Image (cartoon, rainbow, N blue to C red):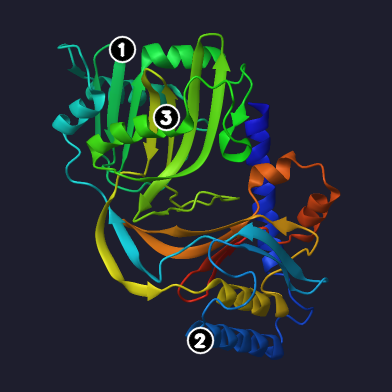
Amino acid sequence: MKKECFIVLMAGILGICALTGCRKAPEASSDSDILHAKGSAERDVENITAEDTAEEESGTDPGGIYDALIGTEENGIRICAKLPTVPDTIPTLTIGKRDDLDGDKLKALLDSESKDVKDITAAYLAQREKELSEMSEDDIPSEWVYFGDDSNLIFSDGQKEASFARNTSASYEDERLKKSCDAIYKKAPEINVTQDGEAASAKFSAARAEEILLNKLAVLDITEIHLTKALYYELEETAFYELHFTPSYEKTGIAAEFGQLTKGEIHPQGTAWITEDGIAMLSLEDCCGKITDQSGNGKILTFSQVTGILEKYLENNTLLGLSDAELTQVELVYYPDFQKPELILTPAWHIYTPLEQKIDSDDEVWNRVFERGAATNIYLDAVTGELIKAE
């Protein structure tokens, strides 16, 4: 729990530093010359995106390792990461709420062996209303922005419970399996399979856990996911994986690494606890929307174009970097932009160092990253080159 709180706190610090760092400019920031310089940088970016560039430079081949400094030692970004193979073009997607998350589909998600399945929606809403009415005004949660509508549907058979919310979210829990997982959660050694690989003594593989998860998600017509982290816990006879994931469309997942979150942002994310016997817990927050529109296929920037664009942003201090800090991950993802009532998914190049890797490091370099407000989590529009987010 302390570690989780620390991660959230550091995420906030990173976000604040980024907001300060990315906006840092020469002293005469309001001078017309600075505005002109920014305009020139924008034109430079447009010129780079217009180039018909092949991946000819050493170290920018898809599937290869890129290891180089972009910019200068004084203000530069060092990337050492494997480059993904990406499609030539990719559409921008519009995601809306579902209209088929009904009782029949919820029963299929519940998958109960009991004939005594009850609709407990009314009881749940009444209990929630009672709890809110008993809170002091200061304790009532502030209203948040939601993706979807105000619908709720909850079924239970006494052991299993499943729900739909807002026609965009879903959850599932098997009380018996979850109780076993709770008993060892954070007590058993935590093995980060994504980072460290499979445990030699694991009772079953992460691939098998993902297979069990996808079989469950198929009920909701979700056929692929973007797995962002897999943790393994084992103690005595109990073993389970904690999988973190986002929706994925034609093998392109949604962004999952963020710092400070602000009101109005929607970040689809899924979490599951999976045992050999089945799923103990499943949460699909804003993951169940459907594609309502897709706009043309935009041409994806090559990585050599991306590095050229980053250099322009560094030249005019739109980006601040620290040349000693390595950014270790490069991926193509969809960046979510909530334009109520829909979620717009824009293809983006994501260049970053995972937050946990920075927090777990005692390296003095990362202290200087925080002090400088250097960007270590960068999202760049994969078609236009626009800087979406840097922190």
Q: Residue furthest top?
A: 236
Q: Amino acid at mark 2?
A: Glu
Q: Are marks 1 and 3 in contact (CB under 8 Å)?
A: no
Tag shown at residue 349 = none
- Looking at the image, which residue is at 35% across and 29% down? 212
Q: What distance separates the C-alpha of mark 1 from that of mark 3?
A: 22 Å
The crowding category of the residue bearing disc 1, from other C-alpha atoms within 10 Å (few below 14, some 14 to 19, many at least 20), is few
Q: Are marks 3 and 2 in contact (CB under 8 Å)?
A: no
Quarter of the view holding residue 80? bottom right
The crowding category of the residue bearing disc 2, from other C-alpha atoms within 10 Å (few below 14, some 14 to 19, many at least 20), is few
- Looking at the image, which residue is at 68% across and 51% down? 14
The percent coordinates of residue 357 (x first, y second) are 69, 44
Residue 334 shows in the view = yes
Closer to viewer: mark 2 or mark 1 = 2
Residue tagged 2: 51
Describe residue 224's horizontal placement relative to residue 31 as left or right: left
In the image shown, does 189 or 150 lie closer to the viewer? Answer: 189
Q: What distance separates the C-alpha of mark 2 from that of mark 1?
A: 59 Å
- Looking at the image, which residue is at 62% across and 73% down? 307
As displayed, is residue 376 above or below residue 118?
below
Q: Of the two numbered discs 2 and 1 on the same chain, state the one appearing first in sequence.
A: 2
The percent coordinates of residue 269 (x first, y second) are 43, 43
Residue tagged 1: 159
Q: Of the two numbered discs 1 and 3 on the same chain, state the one appearing first in sequence.
A: 1
Q: Amino acid at mark 3?
A: Ala
Q: Amino acid at mark 1?
A: Gln
Task: Please identify the quadrant where the C terminus is shown.
Answer: bottom right
Task: Please identify the quadrant where the N terminus is shown.
Answer: top right
> SS of the residue at dot 3?
helix
Tag shown at residue 209 = 3
As displayed, is residue 311 above or below residue 191?
below
